[in-house]
Amino acid sequence: MHYRLEASDLEQLLDALKADGYALLGPQRQDNAILYDTLESVADLPQGWTDQQEAGQYKLKRREDAAYFGYVVGPRSWKRVFLPPRKRLWSATQQDGVWSISEEPLPTQKVALIGVRACEIHAIAIQDRVLREGPYPDPYYTTMRAQSLIIAVNCTQAAPTCFCTSMDTGPNATFGFDLSLTELLEPAHCFVVEVGSPKGQALVETLGLPAANDPDQARAQAGVDQARKQIKRTLQRDDVKALLYRNLEHARWDEVASRCLSCANCTMVCPTCFCTEMEDITDLTGDHAERWQRWDSCFHGQFTHVHGGPVRQSTRSRYRQWLTHKLASWEDQFGTTGCVGCGRCIAWCPAGIDLTAEVKAFRESEHTQENNKR
Amino acid sequence: MGASPAIRPMTPRPFRIEAVRPETPNVFTWTLRPTQEDGPLVFQPGQFNMLSIFGVGEVPISVSGDAEQSEIWVHTIRSVGTVTQVMETKKAGEIVGVRGPFGNTWPLQAAEGCDVVLAVGGLGLAPMRPTIYHVLHHRERYKRVYLLYGARTPKDILYPDELKAWSESGALDIRTTVDVGMDGWDGEVGLVTDLISDIRIDPYHSIAMVCGPEIMMHFTAKALFHRRIAPARIFLSMERSMRCGTGWCGHCQLGPTFLCKDGPVYDYPSIQPWLHKREL
């Protein structure tokens, strides 16, 4: 069953969430990008703006309409809600040679994520496999996941960097949301609303939303179909794991390493990358100590440090680790690929390195070898 | 909030250093006792703890003590990095943090009724010592047990008194070799792999456990293979950077596995594709 929410009533949805005790997080224009941050009202949404993306490029541009969600994805993913870039794990104090350790309190604030894309829902589900469903669930992550509510927004347009259709993660949300919205601009600005959970159903009832009629539903479907048609980037994923494992010593790694800056941007913007570093700090007296967990990256020089130096010294080995982890070993580890096709790593790579092109290069070189044999 | 939740996996517990025993140059052994009673300290041979110096950092260190001693942890540490160099300065009575144990275990049950080859290089003897204690406690469960040990120099030989006692008791057949000899050394000079050709085993009923530098394990596994021990009966303990022990931090990946939760002990066939690959 689908419902209809007038664009002019979007504020009521936000108010209902606030009344229910949720802090709102959603898209807004900041630093010339569309970022997810604390949302006060509909006025904060990036209405009338869109993003233009290409390999190594991201630009905001005015739209000619009043769409609230007329952009694709920005550099910030939702992972920071559940796995913050930096968080204190515990602090310890020494008195007379005795250390007492106090754990950081877990967050209690409920959060509503507004405008979660289909690929991002998959990214959250993938991080769940890592941090929630493993032998050691991360207490912060599981707490925040349990007290989060997800309002998805289906994509009706795609960026040239998108390839969710290859990864089977979009453009529309099919699970993992409380409500999903499809924004319609014509003939009247409104949202077609789908319920994904009892919490979502309760919201629909609170708002007293009417059912969406057939033409609205058809227009919503047409919007999603339009996004799907716009997607031109592809990644053949059925055999990519074996392809990469077969080519661990391929010369292509040297070629991509000659372009890669080892800057770690791809891992910072990636919605599934989860690597972290533990950092110990102390004050001048040495009587107070803290441990912080912060995002780390397999592109950092010290990431693999053991006595004697880092295991992965070259950029070649680090890019190989990243790509094979994303597309191959992730599957061995968590039963799913680590890539959702959001295209962030392509847009935010300062060198414009495109993982879909890298995978194609491996595949083509094998075809060439095959042909040469004949 | 109600009752305080169980301690989180990233939170260390305070332990007091009960004894510091110098071993070889830069290597020392700690005996650690919890400052608060909280039940027996249970571990399986091969597992490791994350040891913290508050305000300095945390490092993974294998347990090198006896699993039947459930009131203390024993750890043998080499001072090589920022954290371990500070550890070396710590004295008995001081407090350190401990999380763990983490990781999997040596195949001690699978080895029952078999000849056992323990091949260790350098500090690899420390993570193997709990296995040795286990074998000694249950000597009747195992047939011939070899300890093949390669150290850099005679001065680097770890636990010399225990090695002597184990050997003299006849419980273990211990063969030691050093990379470089010195005055007064009348033992073997060479690699651990050289010791493998002389042992007498039933290869069809043998299990080998290998712990040492990766290159040493690579060649030891090959030598064991040439004694017709099946690859699936050869086990290695791997090493990578470990920061969490829980599989969250991503540092210890080697191919498809996380050493901290899937390892550090692997049977040779499952780790062989990822061994001896440069910078993997």
Image (cartoon, grey):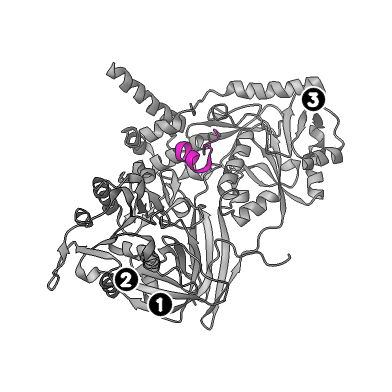
Residue at 53% x, 34% y is A343
Residue at 58% x, 51% y is A83
Question: What residue type is disc 1 on?
Answer: Lys
Q: Which residues are magenta?
A: A326-341
The residue that disc 3 covers is A188
Count all numbered tags in the image, as a single digit: 3
Q: Position of residue B145 (x, y in %)?
A: 30, 61
Badge 3 marks a residue whose secondary structure is loop
Question: What residue type is disc 3 on?
Answer: Ala
Q: Can residue A312 be spotted in the picture? A: no
The residue that disc 1 covers is B90
Q: How far apart are the alpha carbons under marks 1 and 2?
A: 13 Å
| A290 on left or right of A300 | right
Which quarter of the image is occupied by the N terminus of chain A?
top right
Q: How far apart are the alpha carbons under marks 3 and 1?
A: 73 Å
Above or below, comparing residue A286 to residue B264 in the picture: below
